[in-house]
Image (cartoon, rainbow, N blue to C red):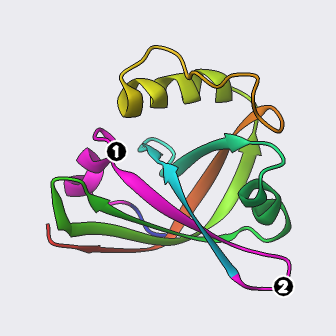
Amino acid sequence: MASIPEPYHDLFDKRTFAHLSTVTPDGTPHPTPVWIDYDADTDRLLVNTARGRRKERNVRRNPAVGVSMCDPEDHYRFVSVLGEVTSVTEEGAVDHIDALATRYMGVDEYPNHGEETGPRVIVEIRPDRVLTGGG
């Protein structure tokens, strides 16, 4: 298991967009732009989505994922993670999406509650390999 190096933790305080790549049923990659978060205490990347979306269905079937993100202030500074989804949980997911909405949209509450395909979930990703650059 690998960890996100401390000098890159600031990327999770900014409006840093990531690309989450999951694996479809036929084995092809499915990259999706996502809001990203990091829990340094558990060393898990966190992605919030709605149950039933393609990425959520993909990780339930195959937990192998890739995540790539660039510093919005310096596009040559990046973190790339190969890892595995260790949990998909509804617990705390609504509060989590509201916190992400504050960072990414400058609002107190995510504006699309109730317009999803299913309940909100947090996808927890264990980083197994971490590559960094530009830092």
Magenta includes 36? no
In the figure, is residue 33 to the left or right of 117? left
Residue 82 at x, y = what percent?
A: 52, 74
Q: Which residue is mark 1?
A: 12
Residue 114 sits in quarter:
top right
* Mark 1 element type: helix
Q: Position of residue 51 (x, y in %)?
A: 80, 43
Q: Residue at x 55, y 23 (%)?
A: 110
Relative horizontal placement of residue 105, taking residue 112 as reference (left or right): left
In the image as oriented, which residue stretches furthest toward the bottom? Answer: 27
Q: Is residue 118 above or below residue 132?
A: above
Relative to 18, is 114 on the left or the right? right
User: What's drawn in magenta, residue-wise?
Assistant: 4-28
Q: Characterize the local packing of mark 1: few (<14), some (14-19) or many (20 or more) Cα atoms within 10 angstroms.
A: some
Residue 124 percent location from the top left of the image: 62, 50
Q: Is 126 situated above or below 10? A: below
Image coords of residue 120 (percent x, y): 73, 33
Q: Residue at x 40, y 52 (%)?
A: 17
Q: Residue 28, labelled with which disc? A: none
Residue 26: mark: 2
Residue 9 sits inside the magenta stretch: yes
Viewed as shown, does residue 69 lie left or right of 86? Answer: left
- How many numbered dots are placed on residues in this image? 2
Three-letter code, disc 1? Phe
| 3D distance between C-alphas at marks 2 and 1 | 32 Å
Q: Mark 2 or mark 1: which comes first in sequence?
A: 1
Which residue is at 57% across, 60% downward? 126
Dot 2 falls on a residue whose secondary structure is loop
